[in-house]
Amino acid sequence: MSRYPALNQFNRPPIVVTDNDVLSGRGVNIAAHPGNERFRTLVTTRADENYCEGYSATEKKAVAEEIIHHIASLDPPGRFLKREGRGQVSRGLNGPWEELSRKEALKKTCQALRDCNRNDRETYANGVAAPEDVKVVANEIATGAANEGVSLKDLAARSVVESSERTQEKLREAMQEAGVPEEQIEEQLKRQRADPTYVIPGFAMTSQGTFAPISNPGYGHQPSIMEMMGPDGVPVQHQVVLPMPGQMPGLYSQYPHPAMDMPPFDPAAVAAARIAAGYVHPNDLEKQKAAAAEAVTKAEEDHEATEAAVAAAQEAEAAEDTTI
């Protein structure tokens, strides 16, 4: 985490841990937290000996997305939390807490799935009673696989398609709410379907899995609008025209910066100052040496030519005197 506080760090209420939250950390208190126990049992519903070697990266991500989606669908919604800042107590339930980003939650879930499916981690979640909601999920997975005669990997491949459809729907809702014209929405979603790594300008996924506008990117020639994060982590729109990059103040704009606050560069003035100081650039010095050597060579050639002309004139005069 950055040593500099976030803009909304001082005006947001502290996070109160619930039994549905998944906590990052070490120790018995963290491991025995109800949300962490639910998380481990939920991961075991996807135990598959072919997971580590047989699943593609997209399928692994889709399985992790399903687990995160289930945690978020609880009442109250479960969150993935970590202690805020460095130097905090690393054990127990002491806060303050902050929410993991979507990327961090995916990374944590994928790591748990790898641990669960490793041969040397067969005791993963042993002795932990699964909550009723996890039992329902496990029963749905087992029943669906048995009735359709498919493997867990096939279910994971199906989850990839369903995850893509959910993402498209969330993006559509966010863009419609932001006032993006329908033709622009279709164009952006088409590009996102063709390339799942494509990031639609102006929208980012929140830790809850929804999409929120970072700033209005100017679709349909609309003016750009600055977005600020509210105390609950949801962007709050302000009717302030987003400045151009050259107009944005820097992080340390209260202090002069040699690269930002210098007067415009004047090549003529710089050249005059160099001449007054007797400074010669190394490249210019080489050019001057070459020019001087060329001048000397030319002078020698001119001298030889002059001497030859004088000698020829003297011979002509001598021949003329002899003839007289």
Image (tube, rainbow, N blue to C red):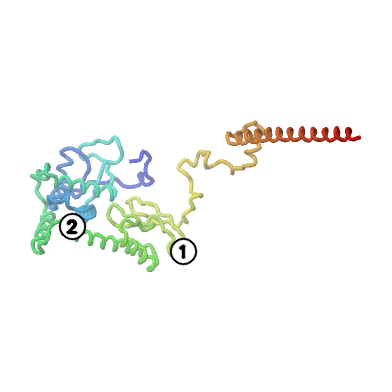
Side of 52 where 288 appears, left or right? right
Whole-percent x and y of residue 208?
Answer: 27, 54
With respect to residue 156, does 283 lie above or below? above
With respect to residue 139, does 17 lie above or below? above
Q: Nearer the viewer, residue 62 or 87?
A: 62
The count of marks equals 2
Residue 77 can be seen in this image: no
Give the residue at mark 2: 156
Residue located farthest toward the right when viewing the structure as drawn: 324
Q: Amino acid at mark 2?
A: Ala
Whole-percent x and y of residue 130?
Answer: 10, 50
Q: Amino acid at mark 1?
A: His
Residue located farthest toward the bottom when viewing the structure as drawn: 183
Give the residue at mark 1: 221
Side of 31 where 286 appears, left or right? right
With respect to residue 184, does 212 lie above or below? above
Q: Quadrant of residue 25?
A: top left
Crowding near the residue tagged with mark 2, few <14, some 14–19, many ≥20 C-alpha atoms within 10 Å: many
C-alpha distance separating marks 1 and 2: 41 Å
Q: Secondary structure at mark 1?
A: helix
Q: Nearer the viewer, residue 265 or 17?
A: 265
Q: Secondary structure at mark 2?
A: helix
Contact between labelled residues 2 and 1, with CB atoms less than 8 Å apart: no
Residue 253 can be seen in this image: yes
Crowding near the residue tagged with mark 1, few <14, some 14–19, many ≥20 C-alpha atoms within 10 Å: few
Location of the N terminus by quadrant is: top left
